[in-house]
Image (cartoon, coloured by chain):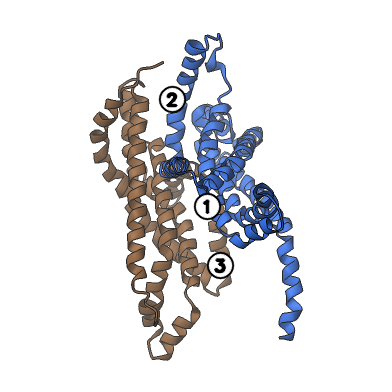
Amino acid sequence: MKLDTKFMLETFIDVLGGVPVTLKITIVTLLVSVPAGFMMALSRAGNGRIGRRIIIAYVSLIRGTPVVLQILFLYSLLPTLLNYLIKEILGLEYNIFRLDPILYAYSVFILNTTAVLSEVFRSALSTVNQGQMEAALSIGMTKTQAYIRIIVPQALVAALPNICNTTVSLLKSTSLAFMMTVRDITAIAKIDASFGYNYLEAYLVIFFAYILLCSLVQGVFYLTEHSVSSYRREKAIRKAPVMQNG
Amino acid sequence: MRPFHPYYIIEVLPVLIPYLLVTAGIVIGTVFFGSLLGILLAAGRIRRGRVGRVIANIYIYVIRCVPSIVLLFLVYYGLPEFLNVFGVDINNAGKGFFVITTFSILFAAAMAEVFRSAYEAVDKGQREAAVSIGLTEFQAFRRIVLPQCVRVAIPNFTNALINLMKEGSLAYTIGLIDIMGKGQLIIGQNQGSYSLEVYLALFILYWVLTVVIEKGAGLLETRLQYCRRTIA
């Protein structure tokens, strides 16, 4: 077995150029999906029955089907649908097929991650005691204030480990974006490999790139968790002497 | 706008359904081999030995970071060359072999965590009590600890299983003909038309599979919960 190390090094440098694209997809998706997923979790806990049914069906459908199928479906639906909408209904002269394919990547991953995160937030919200809400209301806060100042911060801390997991799996699924002709890490390495059939080396490079990226993401989440859960640690420290005495 | 024929979804479903057997075969093969490897990894993490724990931790960390499609192609291109060094020729092995190998590697990491958390969820006192009344170490594990582990493990195992089934759809990228592969073939035969209809049919199949697995696991869980009688 011989590995072309020179090729691997060159590809690795090429692949670094794709890192911003991969991170861009991940970050944009999270920026949209975190609030959207949170709203979804809240409205699922609310009273509206029809809305609740729709959300439950949506979450179940997205979580019950492979990402790759969602990508293939939306990538064959969206361009023609948008083209039809713009040309026939709006009557505009705009060539939709010149649109940056990263937009399709955003839409697929946003649809997917929102569903996953809504479940994450639902379980996180259920960890916050009902008494917290009652206490906040009893001292004269409005419901919105209570959510923003009391409930959400606690729920977010509880949700962080799961958000980290979701981000890692989102980052991994962005490797499928090459199916939508997005030039991310995977696409660049595959293009490099196609010249000399060095696929094994190319995939090894992608492998290492993803290990690095995932470690980065997990490191960031570790630090965030460490800083936002500081109030918990303070409590633990204050409790410690009592336990020693008792 | 391209024409959309809803009736084609119903037409294509019977063509796809026989290929569920391939999907099921991949899942069952992977669950078997992946669980075996997962048990080894979980044992590595639970036992006192330092080397075993380090190896298991590194394995789980690395696998957690790697997209399935990348590992699939690594195995597909790399394994024949790697085994060639030892004089083993698997260039003629079926696609299913590579798919099951890849997903076993992935599934093992998930299972290791499932097994470990299930094992740790059972109180140490259970084993101690069993041993104190004269059961051997093996009997205590087999009759007391294991049944409790199984019940704890079901929800996590179900999640891993559903994930495996969904990730398994990537197997078509190396040319395996499961339901996804057959769907792509049908689209290819139609020169790309009816793609939406075929994808919708696949959505239905995968969704039904997931719901069936979830419901089945839920039933199993409540059944096993029944054994957990309290004194009062």
Mark with earlier residue (1, 3) = 3
Q: Give amino acid for label 3.
A: Arg
Which residue is at a point 61% across and 39% down the rendered structure image? Answer: A26
Q: CA distance from mark 1 to mark 2?
A: 31 Å
Q: Give amino acid for label 2.
A: Ser
Which residue is at a point 43% across and 67% down the rendered structure image? Answer: B152
Q: CA distance from mark 1 to mark 3?
A: 15 Å
Question: Residue at label 3?
Answer: B53
Q: Determine crowd level at label 1: few under 14, some 14-19, many 20+ residues with C-alpha closer than 10 A.
A: many
Tag 1 secondary structure: helix
Of residues A147 and A83, the one nearer the viewer is A147
Does the CB distance between marks 1 and 3 fall below 8 Å?
no
Q: Which chain wears brown?
A: B
Question: Residue at label 1?
Answer: B63
The C terminus of chain B: image quadrant = bottom left
Tag 3 secondary structure: helix
What is the drawing colour of chain A? blue
Residue B87 in percent (x, y) is at 40, 50
Question: Residue at label 2?
Answer: A76
